[in-house]
Each structure stands twice: as structure tokens, then as C-alpha cells.
Amino acid sequence: MRRILLLSFIFCIVGISTAQNRRDKDKKRQIHRVKKTQFGIRSGLNYSMTTGNDIIGNESRIAYHFGAYVQFPLSKKNKDLLIETGLFYSHKGWNLGFIVPDKMNEYMGAVTGLNKLDYGQSSAKMEFLDIPIILKDNQSEKFVPFGGLEFSTLLKTDFEYGYKYVGEDGKEVFKTERTQPKDNLQTLFIGVIMGMEYHVNHFLNLNASFNYPLTNLDNKGFSDIKILNIKLAVGFTF
């Protein structure tokens, strides 16, 4: 009988302790759970690269982005999911690449002519206005996965390329030129975005995301070049 009472007492203590720990965890999670509209700022690095059969030997470009965002529960009844959107100024492009089709080179503003022999390396510095619309998990205390779409408007493009031609002395000359072929490129880009956010505390968060574009670079279908982008950022929510 004593053993039964002792075991019962131990089970009660363990049960109370487990319930208390669960309540403490739930209470701690509730501190980070978003219950109303919140605003924030975010800034960090861009690691962009190109994909497609029409560009080879390319090197990625490291640049930056910054902007502001707003997040709020999906609905009054469903607060397990958040909707987040924002506005970010973002630099992308590539540092070194060889564009294969001559038509695309000409479309980017490269010099053409009868004495043109070959195009060499190229680079592009592109400025965008990114507008992500994503769903975020609002159940986790620390790690928050998210996914959605990102709409990007092209603001400016600096395209630098090299080409060979035959000089007046009959020798081959390699020359570098710069153009700004914004009018020849898409003005609106759509990409699928997915990532993970880590909450350091209620205000500070670390954010990593990957954007896979659904839109080609040019608007005439001369090539299949797309720009992929990875973002690493620090955010502050108010």
C-alpha cells in the first residue's frame, strides 16, 4: 500500500511538472506570436547569379538590398499563418558572363558591324524594386519557414561587354563598352520565393531566402537567361 501511495505521489509530481513546463513553453511562444499588424525594416546582402543555356562561364554578383515590411495574421480566426509584404530596393546581376546568341548581345546594346568578330565577357548591374508577398508560419517560437511570390520592377541596368573587331592596321582589337538597355528588357519580373527566419528575440530576426525567377531577362524571347537571387538579411520588427 505504501508503495502504491509513493508511486502515485511520484506520478502526480511528474504530471504537475510536465504540465507546468508545457504552460511555460506555450506562454513563452505566445510572446513571439504575432497577434496584430506589425511593421519592420530589413537590410542585407544579395547573392545573384544567372541561369539558362544562353549564358556560360558566369560569375555571381554580391550586392545589397534594404527596405521595409508589414506583417499581420491571415485572419482573426486563423493566427497560425501570417501574411507579409514589403518594398525593397535591391541590386542584382552578374559579374562575368559570356552571352551566346549574337541577337541577345545586340539587344543588350552591343556594337554591331561587318568587322565584328566575336563578343567576349559581359557584366550587368541591375537595380530593382522588390515586392514580396509571402505566407509565414506563426506557430514556432524561433524558426519561421515562409514562401510565396516576389514581384520585381526593373529600375536601371548597366551592361558592360567586350568585343573583338579588326582595326585599321588589320589587327584584332578588344574593346569594352557600356550601355543601359532598360527599354529592351522585361519591366516586371515574377519569382517564387522561399526561406527561413530565425527570431533572436521579439524584435531582432535573421532572414534567409531564395528567389527562383519565372520570367526571362529579355522581353522578345531571344534568350532563356534568368537571374536567381539569394538574400541574407537582418530585420527589426516594431
Image (tube, rainbow, N blue to C red):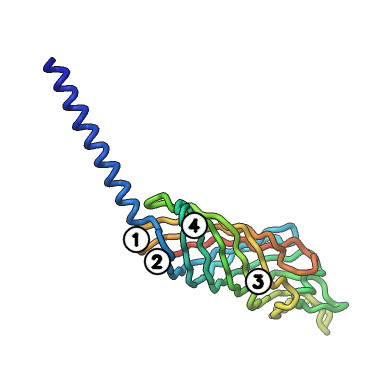
Q: Is mark 4 on a helix, strand or loop?
A: loop
Whether tag 3 and tag 4 are in contact, CB under 8 A, the answer is no
**Image quadrant assignment for residue 164:** bottom right
Q: How far apart are marks 3 and 2 (CA)?
A: 36 Å
User: Which of labels 4 and 2 is toward the front?
Assistant: 4
Instruction: Tell me if 210 is positioned left or right of 55 in this view.
Output: left
Q: Quadrant of the N terminus?
A: top left
Q: What residue type is labelled 1?
A: His
Q: Are there few (<14), some (14-19), or many (20+) residues within 10 Å of tag 1?
A: some
Q: Name the residue under label 2.
A: 237
Q: Are there few (<14), some (14-19), or many (20+) residues within 10 Å of tag 3?
A: many
Instruction: Tell me if 126 is positioned left or right of 237 in this view.
Output: right
x 70%, y 77%: residue: 182
Q: Which residue lies furthest to the bottom in this view?
A: 168
x 69%, y 73%: residue: 187
Q: Where is residue 193 in the image (x, y as percent from the top left)?
A: 58, 58
Determine which of the numbered discs, if any, sits on residue 183 in the image.
Answer: none
Q: Mark 1 points at which residue?
A: 202
* Residue 180 vertical placement versus 96 (above, below): below
Q: Which of marks 4 and 1 is nearer the N terminus?
A: 4
Whether tag 2 and tag 1 are in contact, CB under 8 A, the answer is yes
Q: What element carries label 3?
A: strand
Whether tag 4 and tag 1 are in contact, CB under 8 A, the answer is no
Q: Distance between the residues labelled 3 and 1?
A: 41 Å
Q: Name the residue under label 4.
A: 75
Q: What element carries label 1?
A: loop
In the rendered picture of this protein, how many numbered marks are placed on residues? 4
Q: Which of marks 4 and 2 is nearer the N terminus?
A: 4
Which of these two is toward me, 17 or 161?
17
Q: Which of marks 3 and 1 is nearer the N terminus?
A: 3
Q: Which amino acid does label 2 sit on?
A: Thr
Q: Where is residue 185 in the image (x, y as percent from the top left)?
A: 73, 72
